[in-house]
């Protein structure tokens, strides 16, 4: 009996033409994709339903009264940004909030003068937040939710803290993560929840992206309840595969509108590559191969390059933190996360980076879509992760 032929797989490269993969018979373990989403009017409708639902929590209209000064604080990249904001504005205006009393804030404070004192933290140190948020009668927090495999799952994007804090506070979070890695996350969570409490945030809208930047889910309510519910809503980005693969091909998603706003200080598009590699590593043999596919014009950075050239990582991180340079510290953090994720696995990249840069980093270089297709065709076992930087796959 002839073996059943595995269907070909179309993989988005971020360019004009996708890569077509044709795995050998029986080699494909999983072809993992995110959830389907909606756009335009359908996205507007999805948000309108979420913020008006009385079963989960008090609807948005009950959080405000006429003459309130309301700030819509958008943090991180969010899918279908315009329809989302439009739906929130319309709901507030239907609750008799004047359009002139609604302010959209979607960028971090540029200077200390743009911030105001909010409260003291557990150590008695002052916490400052964007003045517009502190002065508002009501803050409607709107943020994207995504998994970050490089941090073990929890993404820092989409939260008010440290996005809208002073520059030195944002840098302090990056420093702690660079020094301690995931061990710094509990302290950040405590600070983030305390800021929400002191600011009096009760209206919280979290959004889950679908494939290709669409909107897959919108969850509204009180902060703690929303955090639990949105994890369930994003479960489709947490695929479970039967076993590890010898080769995992991981593509990069396209940036969402405003994605840089919620990123760590100095982080660039390279952060998405680190997340994708970390996601792929979770389902790839320790001595297997990861192939990264997607647009990546940002060079990895000087700390990353020195590490790949043989400099001890711990010393590089210490040196970067000592400079107090946000770009170097962010690069040190991403280098630390990348090193932990990749381990002894081989990396092959098909991106916009020059071949000479990739070779200097001692990674494999795919010159064309055909190179990626050949790698997939020869693999004894294969997993494909579409938009891997949004995924948190596991072996079950």
Image: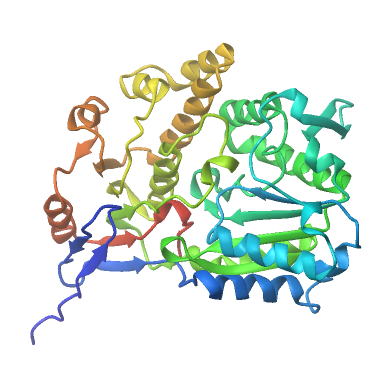
**Relative side of 137 to 310, left or right:** right
What residue is drawn where x is 37% and y is 51%? 252
Which quadrant of the figure has residue 387? Answer: bottom left
Q: Nearer the viewer, residue 120 or 248?
A: 120
**Relative side of 87 to 94, left or right:** left
Q: Nearer the viewer, residue 259 or 184?
A: 259
What residue is drawn where x is 49% and y is 25%? 332
- Residue lying farthest bottom? 1
Colour scheme:
rainbow
Is any part of residue 106 visible from this angle?
Answer: yes
Q: Nearer the viewer, residue 297 or 176?
A: 297
- Give the vertical position of 367 relative to 389 (above or below): above
Which quadrant of the figure has residue 376? Answer: bottom left
* Residue 230 coordinates in the image, percent (x, y): 65, 64
* Residue 329 coordinates in the image, percent (x, y): 53, 23
What residue is drawn where x is 18% and y is 63%? 20
**Relative side of 185 to 37, left or right:** right
* Residue 129 coordinates in the image, percent (x, y): 78, 35
- Give the vertical position of 79 relative to 242 (above or below): above
- Give the vertical position of 375 relative to 301 (above or below): below
Is any part of residue 121 visible from this angle?
Answer: no
Q: Nearer the viewer, residue 126 or 117?
A: 117
* Residue 172 coordinates in the image, percent (x, y): 67, 26
What residue is drawn where x is 24% and y is 34%? 363
């Amino acid at each position: 009996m002839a073996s059943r032929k595995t269907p070909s797989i179309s993989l988005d490269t971020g360019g004009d033409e996708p890569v077509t993969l044709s795995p050998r018979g029986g080699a494909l373990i999983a072809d993992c994709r995110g959830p389907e989403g909606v756009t335009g009017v359908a996205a507007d409708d999805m948000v309108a339903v979420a913020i008006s639902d009385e079963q989960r929590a008090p609807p948005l209209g009950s959080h405000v009264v006429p003459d309130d000064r309301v700030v819509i604080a958008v943090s991180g990249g969010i899918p279908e940004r315009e329809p989302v904001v439009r739906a929130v504005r319309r709901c507030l205006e239907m609750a008799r909030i004047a359009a002139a009393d609604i302010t959209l804030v979607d960028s971090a404070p540029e200077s200390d003068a743009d911030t105001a004192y909010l409260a003291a933290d557990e150590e008695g140190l002052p916490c400052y937040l964007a003045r517009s948020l502190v002065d508002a009668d009501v803050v409607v927090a709107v943020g994207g939710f995504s998994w970050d495999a490089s941090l073990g799952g929890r993404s820092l994007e989409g939260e008010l803290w440290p996005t809208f804090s002073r520059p030195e506070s944002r840098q302090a979070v990056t420093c702690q993560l660079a020094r301690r890695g995931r061990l710094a996350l509990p302290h950040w969570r405590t600070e983030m929840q305390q800021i929400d409490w002191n600011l009096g945030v009760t209206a919280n809208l979290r959004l889950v992206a679908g494939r290709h930047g669409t909107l897959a889910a919108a969850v509204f309510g009180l902060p703690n309840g929303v955090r639990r519910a949105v994890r369930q809503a994003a479960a489709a980005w947490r695929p479970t595969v039967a076993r590890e693969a010898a080769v995992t091909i991981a593509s990069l998603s396209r940036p969402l509108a405003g994605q840089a706003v919620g990123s760590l200080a100095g982080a660039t598009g390279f952060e998405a590559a680190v997340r994708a590699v970390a996601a792929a590593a979770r389902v790839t043999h320790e001595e297997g191969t990861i192939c990264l596919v997607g647009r990546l014009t940002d060079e990895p950075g000087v700390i990353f390059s020195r590490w790949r050239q043989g400099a001890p990582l711990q010393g590089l991180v210490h040196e970067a933190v000592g400079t107090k340079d946000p770009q170097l510290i962010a690069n040190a953090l991403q280098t630390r996360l990348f090193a932990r994720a990749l381990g002894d696995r081989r990396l092959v990249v098909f991106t916009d980076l020059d071949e000479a840069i990739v070779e200097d980093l001692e990674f494999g270089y795919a010159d064309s879509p055909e190179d990626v297709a050949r790698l997939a065709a020869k693999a004894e076992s294969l997993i494909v992760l579409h938009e891997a930087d949004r995924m948190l796959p596991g072996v079950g």
